[in-house]
Amino acid sequence: MKIKLVVIFVLFLNSKIFSQDIYYKVEYGKGSGTASDVYLQIKLDYFLVEIEAKRLKSTIRDMDMEISTNIDGYDYYNDYIKLLLDVLSATADGLTIKIGENSEYVTTEIKKMSYSLNDWDLFLDFDEGPMTTPLLNANFNLQDAKISLARGIKRNMGTNERLIYNYFANAHGSILIKKLSFNISIDRNGMVSAEGNLDMPVGKAKVNATLTMGKNFRTEPYLDMLELDFTNLSPDVQNLMDDLVENEGVQLKKHRTGYSLRMSGDIDNPRIY
């Protein structure tokens, strides 16, 4: 099956449109689908987004969503979103994303990308914040990505920006990512756990963190633990990290295999060790 979708948005800032009441509710039991040769274009004046995918696959199971903004006669919560979700997942193969304006684009080519949202229970008031403790689990994975900048974008970079970009770019001027993964979850006690991994030809990065937000997210967040590690660094990136520590005051600890950071305590004044 081939799908070609071109969407052209012309937005006029009309206050009457944005002030109208909106109520939206959807319930979904179970379903899945696939599509091939997908094309999406979004154009806002000179700004352009183009997305192409050779193959898309999605799955959804047990979703109830409700959104309300300024509904007349609805006195309990005026602006809110409710979401109950068992599973929502998607996979894209052969993905190309082009973003930019005036023919100067950032192009990202991805061999495979996927995400999964599991066991979500949210009740969020747009003014007051969470009305109950959010419950969610989400993960994101990306394999073999290449990021390329148009010549005009690189030409307009400042000296420091160009220097940093060259540290991470290959001989052809593109930034390569072998693998990127990220997972985050929130439990009923307001404990946020996150883990991420980045693998590039110029080095690897890994992060682990736990954060206590408290029930309903009404208490000041407390950083239980943050661990950040940089390993397998190329000589150029190693020199960059050395400069950040020695001359810019970045509080990283140098090891034989790379750099690390350990942090815990109050978000406004954490203890670094």
Image (spheres, rainbow, N blue to C red):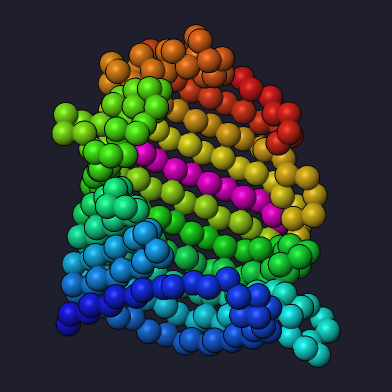
Query: Is residue 78 in view?
Result: yes
Looking at the image, which is closer to me, 5 or 133?
5
Q: Looking at the image, which is closer to me, 210 or 218?
A: 218
Q: Is residue 240 above or below residue 63?
A: above
Q: Position of residue 270 (x, y in %)?
A: 69, 29
Would residue 139 appear left or right of 142 to someone viewing this image?
A: right
Residue 168 visible from this viewpoint: no
Q: Is residue 267 left or right of residue 194?
A: right
**Where, by quadrant of the figure, is residue 257 drawn?**
top left
Q: Residue at x 44, y 73 (%)?
A: 10
Most extreme residue toward the right, as rendered? 75
- Vertical order, 269 against 92 (above or below): above
Q: Quadrant of the N terminus?
A: bottom left
The percent coordinates of residue 192 (x first, y second) are: 62, 50
Q: Nearer the viewer, residue 149 or 152?
A: 152
Question: Residue furthest toward the bottom?
Answer: 73
Residue at 65 percent across and 80 percent down: it is 16
Q: Residue 191 vs residue 177: left or right?
A: right
Farthest-out residue, top? 246
Left or right: residue 193 compared with residue 217: left
**Number of callouts in the render?**
0
Which stretch is magenta?
189-201
Instruction: Give the percent coordinates (x, y) of residue 83.
Output: 60, 75
* Helix, strand or loop for the magenta stretch, by majority: strand
Instruction: Write the residue at 62% across / 64% down.
Output: 135
Magenta stretch: includes residue 1: no
Viewer-nearest residue: 239 or 141: 239
Snapshot quadrant of residue 41: bottom left
Instruction: Locate residue 220, reporting x and y percent.
Output: 78, 45
- Residue at the image position 82 percent from the left and 81 percent from the top: 76
Quarter of the figure with the C terminus: top right
